[in-house]
């Protein structure tokens, strides 16, 4: 590997090119360069993802990671098929230090949108999270593996596997009783810290629910917190997919795209009925029509971004930091805490492929741990005070005082 004298501190990566959505079912997303020309190497890779059964959301996510990489290559004037491990290493360093680019405000379009470090070493924006950098490394390694097999890319993958796989099995000293780990770790893949799910305390949830402004929003939150469905899954419910008689809703799973029926609370169906009565004259009726619609005319099917923004506004008014995905964590914690509900049932409702993923919700919540530990300290203080024998005043016999105050039987 030839060393590079590239000065990353002075590198400016213009925000050129973009990922565009199309109406073509054969090519749902397309990566175009600064001139609006589609990048064929990315298009071929996305077609391969589609053949493997990946969803359109996955194609969009992968295309955005590739856009970030191509912007870096355009800035250093290196073709994607000529990239080496030096460029891969510098790109990973750039993501870690340079930080996220500032988005261009629609009122200030004349401001530059390039990213980089401030003069003197200060950061312009927050660095990319470790999970984002890890996902990017995985996508780029897969991208170059595809072109390596097809014979259309470099003969060496710029994003190789970890050195621990050379000559012997990675993690060979792992405890055989522990669950197997992902051993296909990339050389430049960062360590992603384990993030515990965050549920919403009951008092905070009640405050948020009381500030919801419509029956539709109350029905949405009630379904989220009772079914544990993902945000996009609940929005996939059709009018024929809600069955109040059996207490079930039919959703499309985010990853596998399979049809699943999820049980919901009776309160959720009550709020749903109030929403349907309120909007009966404004939304189309039909078994295959979406269940959730916008409140403002003309009515349109509700999108994820609209629901996300609605929940953000409610949290701003309540002064909380809960997210829309926290409702799924709250539902999972509530179900996992019920001793009468097997963990395998919780796994089925949440749609987890592995039971170990569901077991994360057995981890005690922070607020519960703090409350129990403080109660433990209070109990220890009380017991210590009870063990201290008060001094007996002169002229009184200790056994008489013990009988008088009931400390021992007479």
Image (spheres, helix red, strand yellow):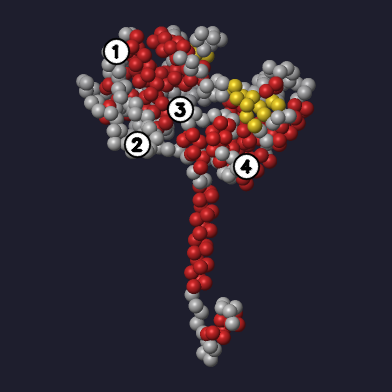
In this view, the residue farthest toward the left is 2
In the image, is 313 to the left or to the right of 22? right
Q: Secondary structure at mark 1?
A: loop
The residue that label 1 is drawn on is: 154
Q: Secondary structure at mark 3?
A: loop
The residue that label 2 is drawn on is: 176
Point out the frontmost of discs 3 and 4. Answer: 4
| Disc 3/disc 2 C-alpha distance (Å) | 46 Å
The residue that label 4 is drawn on is: 205
Q: Quadrant of residue 98?
A: top left
Instruction: Judge by depth and name the residue closer to the eye, 105 or 47.
Output: 47
Q: Secondary structure at mark 4?
A: helix
Q: Is residue 273 visible?
A: yes
| Vertical side of 408 occupied by 354: above or below | above
Mark 1 surroundings within 10 Å by alpha-carbon count, few (fewer than 14), some (14 through 19), many (20 or more): some
| Disc 1/disc 3 C-alpha distance (Å) | 32 Å
For marks 3 and 2 on the same chain, the one whose residue lies earlier in the sequence? 3
Instruction: Please give the name of the residue rendered at 49% of the width and 29% of the height, measured from the top-left corner.
Output: 353
Instruction: Please give the name of the residue rendered at 48% of the width and 75% of the height, measured from the top-left corner.
Output: 388
For marks 4 and 1 on the same chain, the one whose residue lies earlier in the sequence? 1
The residue that label 3 is drawn on is: 102
Q: Quadrant of residue 205?
A: top right
For marks 2 and 1 on the same chain, the one whose residue lies earlier in the sequence? 1
Image coordinates for residue 197, horizontal then vertical, percent: 50, 39
Q: Are marks 3 and 2 in contact (CB under 8 Å)?
A: no
């Amino acid at each position: 590997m030839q060393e590079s004298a590239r000065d990353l501190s002075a590198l400016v990566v213009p925000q050129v090119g973009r990922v565009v959505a199309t109406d073509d079912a054969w090519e749902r997303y397309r990566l175009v360069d600064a001139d609006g020309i589609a990048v064929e190497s990315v298009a071929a890779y996305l077609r391969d993802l589609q053949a493997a059964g990946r969803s359109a959301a996955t194609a969009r996510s992968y295309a955005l990671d590739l856009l970030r990489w191509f912007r870096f290559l355009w800035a250093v004037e290196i073709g994607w098929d000529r990239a080496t491990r030096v460029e891969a290493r510098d790109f990973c360093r750039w993501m870690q230090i340079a930080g996220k680019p500032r988005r261009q405000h629609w009122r200030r379009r004349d401001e530059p949108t390039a990213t980089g470090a401030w003069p003197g070493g200060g950061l312009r924006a927050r660095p990319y999270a470790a999970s984002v950098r890890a996902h990017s490394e995985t996508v780029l390694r897969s991208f170059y593996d595809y072109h390596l097999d097809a014979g259309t890319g470099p003969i060496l993958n710029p994003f190789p596997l970890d050195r621990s796989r050379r000559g012997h099995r990675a993690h060979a000293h792992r405890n055989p009783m522990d669950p197997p780990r992902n051993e296909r770790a990339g050389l430049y893949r960062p360590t992603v810290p384990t993030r515990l799910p965050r549920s919403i305390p009951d008092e905070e949830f009640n405050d948020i629910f009381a500030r919801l402004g419509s029956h539709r929003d109350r029905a949405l939150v009630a379904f989220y917190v009772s079914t544990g469905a993902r945000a996009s899954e609940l929005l996939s419910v059709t009018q024929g997919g809600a069955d109040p008689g059996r207490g079930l809703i039919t959703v499309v799973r985010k990853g596998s795209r399979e049809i699943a029926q999820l049980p919901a609370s009776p309160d959720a169906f009550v709020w749903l009925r109030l929403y349907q009565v309120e909007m009966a004259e404004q939304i189309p009726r039909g078994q295959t029509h979406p269940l959730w619609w916008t409140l403002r005319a003309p009515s349109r099917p509700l999108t994820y971004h609209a629901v996300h923004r609605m929940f953000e506004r409610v949290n701003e008014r309540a002064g909380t930091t809960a997210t829309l995905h926290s409702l799924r964590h709250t539902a999972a914690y509530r179900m996992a805490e019920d001793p009468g509900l097997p963990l395998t049932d919780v796994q089925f409702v949440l749609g987890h492929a592995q039971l170990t993923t569901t077991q994360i919700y057995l981890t005690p919540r922070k607020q519960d741990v703090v409350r129990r530990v403080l109660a433990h300290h209070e109990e220890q203080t009380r017991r210590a005070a009870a063990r201290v024998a008060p001094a007996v005043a002169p002229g009184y016999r200790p056994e008489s005082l013990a009988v008088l105050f009931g400390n021992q039987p007479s």
